[in-house]
Image: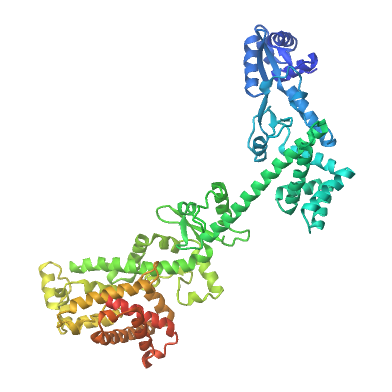
Amino acid sequence: MSSTANIYTLLRLYANKQQKTLIPFDEFCSYLQKYAKHYVTEQPDLSKYLSTPEVPLNQEIEDLAAKNKLLLKESEGKQIIVITAYFMDKINKIYQNMATNPTIPYPIPTDLPNDFPKDMITSQDAADILYELLEGKKQPENVIYSLVFKREVEPVLLSAGVSPDFLIQTALAKLRLLMHRGEQHDYFQQKLLSSNGGRELAVKNFFSMFIGNEEATIAKLKEAGDSFYFMNQLFLFVRHDYEKIKDRTAEDVALLQAVYIAEIAAAFYKNRSQIDLQRETALKNLELSFSKPPYYFDTAAVQKFVDSRGVPLLGQYTEDDLNEYLRQVTTPSADNELPSLLTFKTNDGIRFFVLNEKVLSLVMKLCTEARTKVRDSITKEWYGYMQKFSTTPAMKDMTAFNKRLEELVALESPILYALLNSPFLSVIYYDAREAKDETLEKFKLFESGELVPYNELLMLTQHSIMTDAKILLPVWYTIPILSWIIALFTGKHKNRVKTVKKDSKNTQQQKANKTVQQKGEATISIYEEHKSQSNSSGKKEELKRMASEIEKLIVPPDSTLDSELTSYLNEWNHLLDKTAKKNLVEDVNSLIRDYLRKILRTSSPNSFTLERIKELSYTLAKTPALQKIKDQENLQVYIQLYMLRLIKKA
């Protein structure tokens, strides 16, 4: 026999030699000391057991007990070492034999020797233990389970070395063996046929599969389909019949234990099937949630997604399921195509998700929204410069103007800025161009592989911003001579002499009218012909109130009046030439202003309703000047929106 310094191996060798599983500590200590003297030259590690083996051996024994490899117990004042592997090997041997001979009964507590230590057994409800084992939860090593059933039948012993799948396999094998008997075969098949009228073929096919195909039976048990329903009925019939037996044989007990185990497994797989179905449904709802406004979501928002009932999706699937789903849908395909769900980060490092198919429409929407914010912001900025009779390079230099617009987009619309600078936007844009996406005919993002300037993205010009800023200035800023004098005394004279000479020829009213014409969308004073009336102010406020009410009916909650105006303008104005397009817009706007001014002379605020404004837009759109525009429907909505804007801004 080769020598070893492994105490556990030595214990098992000694137990086999002595043919006992309960070994007194002192007895083994003496044996170990003799063994060490004999083999110390071959195994130098044995030297610590030569003189006083009790101390190192006691430490080794305690370590093995902590690992459940053995038990320590007291008997008549002596410490006894119990080798658990002996009992586990005995139980495992029964299951190994059962694999080839299903008639062998399950091991039960009475099969163990009288001196078997009860501490080794973990008694628990059979369903609880099997559920944990089937879910793959890590179990302690060297443990013997006692599967306690809810009905009066002997518990089944199960060692840690026997898998739950094998246990289920043995249970089905015992039931299959029962069905092979002629009288039992016909009896249980007839019971299934009687309880499933009209499904004779399905029942017979199931019965043939259950008896003759072990792998298919186990697969059907885990799928929880039609065959699963027949299987549960069969288990129920067997259990009811054998529970009625009063004087049960060992075979009867084993069959009852088998059917209990099979029913627990069926309940587990049915429950898991329902959980899987719930998870799959929740993941589909997760996918649908990405296609809803605002179309971009950070991780916190994704975790708060709910289903149609308002129930959070996280909980219907686990956080691991969510992370795995996000990993899969954000990973490029094998041929390097963009994934269905894209990610991008804002300047503050927050990661967002957006569907590939929603990127272009989202960018267009955000550009429309950002236009209003950026225009207001830069208008106020330039107004501040003009108040001080100062300028900024962005007012005159186009490069500086676009640079400032980019800075404001990053500030006012960080999501848009992140998308415009994302690596995937150009790929999506050019793919859509190749697919001849009609929406891109009105919206250009890239030219020669480069992002178009921000002034084109936002449809803003230096001239329009300058005009807006000038309108905000007090009246004396617009009178050339006065503004020149003020600038002179405030040290801001600079090169305004030429401007004064040029502008002094015009009156204040002429300059204001010219500004209105250049802006195209500037607010007009639709009340100037009523200034002499004492109730002009009251009428104006009432009209504004009515306009605000109508706006709520026309403009969607997630949009603005200006956004809708821009959107509908691009719908009816299909001219590609920028100058011609701008001139057409100004002509239409002028007609609307003149027409509205005439209407308001004789109309009362109470008559200004949604129906009335629709009627006015229809009448104006049908005039010879506007009837040439083909898209009459969108033109009429544009007229309605523009009228509301004129009244609100007056």
Q: Return the residue nearer the eye: 305 or 425.
A: 305
Identify the image quadrant of residue 130: top right
State whether residue 53 is above or below residue 586.
above
Expressed as whole percent of the image width and height from the top left, the position of residue 618 reads 38, 86
State whether residue 155 is above or below residue 49.
below
Q: Quadrant of the C terminus?
A: bottom left
Q: Residue at x 59, y 56 (%)?
A: 281
Q: Residue at x 81, y 57 (%)?
A: 200
Q: How is the image coloured?
A: rainbow
Q: Is residue 573 visible?
A: no
Expressed as whole percent of the image width and height from the top left, the position of residue 454 reads 38, 69
Residue furthest right in the image: 182
Callout count: 0
Q: Is residue 154 left or right of residue 599?
A: right
Identify the image quadrant of residue 582: bottom left
Q: Return the residue nearer the eye: 65 or 390.
A: 65
